[in-house]
């Protein structure tokens, strides 16, 4: 199996509430780094799983909806790194339906150099 990893970043702010209490995580910002991991079993006639530019373009398109915005105003869910990783995963999964044999392995959203959240689908056994 072949695996590609593409990374990009965006800057935005968010606050987190718990039971309606904004003070749970007051308004603050991050420069988020996002990593997408895609896999497949075969290469095309050019020796590529998929052109990196295609994945970079799609990732940028998704992240541009968040860049320099208040995430709470953009997404219909609590804007945690965990929820963002699942949202981006779902967007890539839909996108890759057009590319036979490719799968999203995982999406990792980094809030800092030392903290991240990763979403990957559970393997059915």
Image (tube, rainbow, N blue to C red):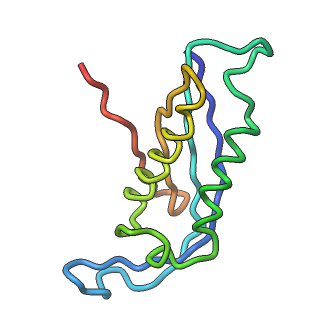
Question: Across the whole image, how many numbered discs are drawn on residues?
Answer: 0
Rendering coords of residue 42 (x, y %): 62, 12
Quarter of the figure with residue 98: top right
Which residue is at the front of the view, 115 or 36? Answer: 36
Please state the horizontal and vertical placement of residue 25, each as a whole percent of the image: 35, 80
Q: Nearer the viewer, residue 97 or 118?
A: 97
Which image quarter holds the N terminus?
top right
Q: Is residue 36 left or right of residue 116?
A: right
Where residue 89 sits: x, y (%)? 47, 45
Task: Point out the residue furthest to the right here.
Answer: 46
Q: What residue is at 30 percent from the left and 33 percent from the top?
A: 122
Q: Which of the image's four quarters has the C terminus? A: top left
Q: Position of residue 124 (x, y in %)?
A: 26, 24
Question: Which residue does the image show at 35% across and 67% down from the upper left?
Answer: 77
Which quadrant of the view contains residue 24?
A: bottom left
Residue at (31% x, 26% y) in the render? 123
Q: Is residue 97 above or below residue 13?
A: above
- Give the residue at the far left of this rendering: 19
Q: Is residue 51 above or below residue 67?
A: above
């Amino acid at each position: 199996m072949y695996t590609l990893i593409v990374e990009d970043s965006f800057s935005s702010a968010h606050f987190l509430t718990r039971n309606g209490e904004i003070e749970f995580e007051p308004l603050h910002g991050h420069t988020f780094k996002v990593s997408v991991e895609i896999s497949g079993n075969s290469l095309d006639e050019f020796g590529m799983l998929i052109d990196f530019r295609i994945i970079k373009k799609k990732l940028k398109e998704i992240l541009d909806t968040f860049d320099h915005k208040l995430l709470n105003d953009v997404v219909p869910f609590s804007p945690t790194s965990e929820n963002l990783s699942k949202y981006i995963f779902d967007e890539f999964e839909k996108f890759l339906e057009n590319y036979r044999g490719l799968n999203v392995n995982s999406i990792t959203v980094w809030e800092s150099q030392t903290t991240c959240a990763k979403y990957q689908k559970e393997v059915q056994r």
